[in-house]
């Protein structure tokens, strides 16, 4: 396979990645895909009690989360390991960590310690609940944040009870918000010359993603309830059964409602005063929904999609994951990116959903093996091969 051109947008940025599991690695993956030199700092074998939490080294999750990074093996629990890390901080732009807040204090790598050796450094901290407050030292996990942030209370069918989302919503969004905060801090540093401490948490990220549901409560005092596959306040918008499966429809306004009724051959519904406005349709959804479900069961999913597309009414299939990547539009977008790995061979990974016309993201390096680049990275701060070998013998790298 032809090796892709390296990404360039962030090639002037060096990141020390102390993260594990998902939120932190997601943040660093964004920076790495756009060209930042991301150094994954990980403990030597047997030092980290959480070793293996992200699954096998050559498993799909590790390969997808840690591509485009270099790996440094370093024991931060030793004085020499911490000293070497701070030397790397002198040459770095960003440090990202998602320890519990007290851990970086115990390791001696809190923001004040990093700032003392490099006033331009940006520390990004991702925690479960925040860097201060009564839950500061609790361990955070995605599903717990989904529950505490309100997502599970509005997900699922009415009367079913709380349901988690099928993906790590809080973890992934916290990583993305951290990446956004880092980019803001880097931009501000161009003016001030000073770094700063960027903070986010799984709980804050989950609440932010609640968006209109959270605002509905904060502004109007309404506690939203689960609506299943129906939109919380717009109808008809949601899942319809067909003769051979299901599809999603999205009728967004009164004009579109009229176009929808004509397209499906039910002009009578378009002229029914009970369904004349969005408010009317929502109020009378218990009557409207069974009528549409009965109608949609008379044709195949493909037939309905063709008919609705011709009428300009939003609709779409409901895919399994294999069908997602077989869709012609998804293939055209190229979000399944080829990559070669020395152990796994040719494979595809999930690309960045952001296009830049001059400096796009690339996947030009597979996920590294643990400590694969230790000698090269420590060489940047002047250590010889013999010195690195001695550190290895002492269990520091």
Image: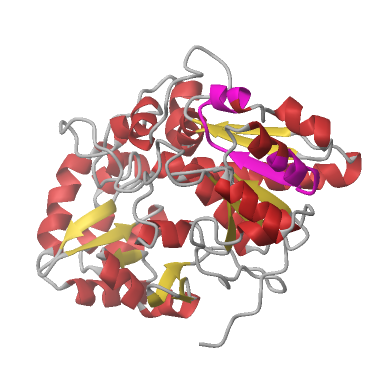
Answer whether residue 66 is visible to the viewer in this image.
yes
- Residue 4, image x and y in percent? 60, 80
> On screen, 152 above or below 3?
above
Q: In the rendered view, does 84 fall on the left or right side of 62? A: right
Q: Position of residue 114 (x, y in %)?
A: 75, 33
Please, is residue 307 above or below residue 133 in the view? below
In the rendered structure, the answer to whether residue 333 lies left or right of residue 118 reads left
Q: Which residue is the extreme one toward the top? A: 134
In the image, taking residue 118 as reference, residue 335 lies left or right, namely left
Residue 36: tell me if it is visible: no
Q: Nearer the viewer, residue 180 or 11?
A: 11
In depth, the one of 18 and 166 nearer the eye is 18
- Above or below, comparing residue 152 to residue 220 in the picture: below
Q: Which residue is drawn at 46% across and 80% down?
A: 332
The quadrant where residue 377 appears: bottom right
User: Of all residues shown, which one is farthest toward the bottom?
Assistant: 2
Residue 164, how many percent across, how many down?
A: 28, 38
Q: Which residue is drawn at 51% across and 49% down?
A: 25
Q: In this view, does 61 lie to the left or right of 287?
A: right
In the figure, residue 263 lies in which quadrant? bottom left
Q: Position of residue 271 (x, y in %)?
A: 27, 55
Residue at image position (38%, 37%) is 142
Q: Does the magenta stretch include residue 293?
A: no
Q: Nearer the viewer, residue 330 or 33?
A: 33
> What segment is highlighted magenta in the picture?
84-106
């Amino acid at each position: 396979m032809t090796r892709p051109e390296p990404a360039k947008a962030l090639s002037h940025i060096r990141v020390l990645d102390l993260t594990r599991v998902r939120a932190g690695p997601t943040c660093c993956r964004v920076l790495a895909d756009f060209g930042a030199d991301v150094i994954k700092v990980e403990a030597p074998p047997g030092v980290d009690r959480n070793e293996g939490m992200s699954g096998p080294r050559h498993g799909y999750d590790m390969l997808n989360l840690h591509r485009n990074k270099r790996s440094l093996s370093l024991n931060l629990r030793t004085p020499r390991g911490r000293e070497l890390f701070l030397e790397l901080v002198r040459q770095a732009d960003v440090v990202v960590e998602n320890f519990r807040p007290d851990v970086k204090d115990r390791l001696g790598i809190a923001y004040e310690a990093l700032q003392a050796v490099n006033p331009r450094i940006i520390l990004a901290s991702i925690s479960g609940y925040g860097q201060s407050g009564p839950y500061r030292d609790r361990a955070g996990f995605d599903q717990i944040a989904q529950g505490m942030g309100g997502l599970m209370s509005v997900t699922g069918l009415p009367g079913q009870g709380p349901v988690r989302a099928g993906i790590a919503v809080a973890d992934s969004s916290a990583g993305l918000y951290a990446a956004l905060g880092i980019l803001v801090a880097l931009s501000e540093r161009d003016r001030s010359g000073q770094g700063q401490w960027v903070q986010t948490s799984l709980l804050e990220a989950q609440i932010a993603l609640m968006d209109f549901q959270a605002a509905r409560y904060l502004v109007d005092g309404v506690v939203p309830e689960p609506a299943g596959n129906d939109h919380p306040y717009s109808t008809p918008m949601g899942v319809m059964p067909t003769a051979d499966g299901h599809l999603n429809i999205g009728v967004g306004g009164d004009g579109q409602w009229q176009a929808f009724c004509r397209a499906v051959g039910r002009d009578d519904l378009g002229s029914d005063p009970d369904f004349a406005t969005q408010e009317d349709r929502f109020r009378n959804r218990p009557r409207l929904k069974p009528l549409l479900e009965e109608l949609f069961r008379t044709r195949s999913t493909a037939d309905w999609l063709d008919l609705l597309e011709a009428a300009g009414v939003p609709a779409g299939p409901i895919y399994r994951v294999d069908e997602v990547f077989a869709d012609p539009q998804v293939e055209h977008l190229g979000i399944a990116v080829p990559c070669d790995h020395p152990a796994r061979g040719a494979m595809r990974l999930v690309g960045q959903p952001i296009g830049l016309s001059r400096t796009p993201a690339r996947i030009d390096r597979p996920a590294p093996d643990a400590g694969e680049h230790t000698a090269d990275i420590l060489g940047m701060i002047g250590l010889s091969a013999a010195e690195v070998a001695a550190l290895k013998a002492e269990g520091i790298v």
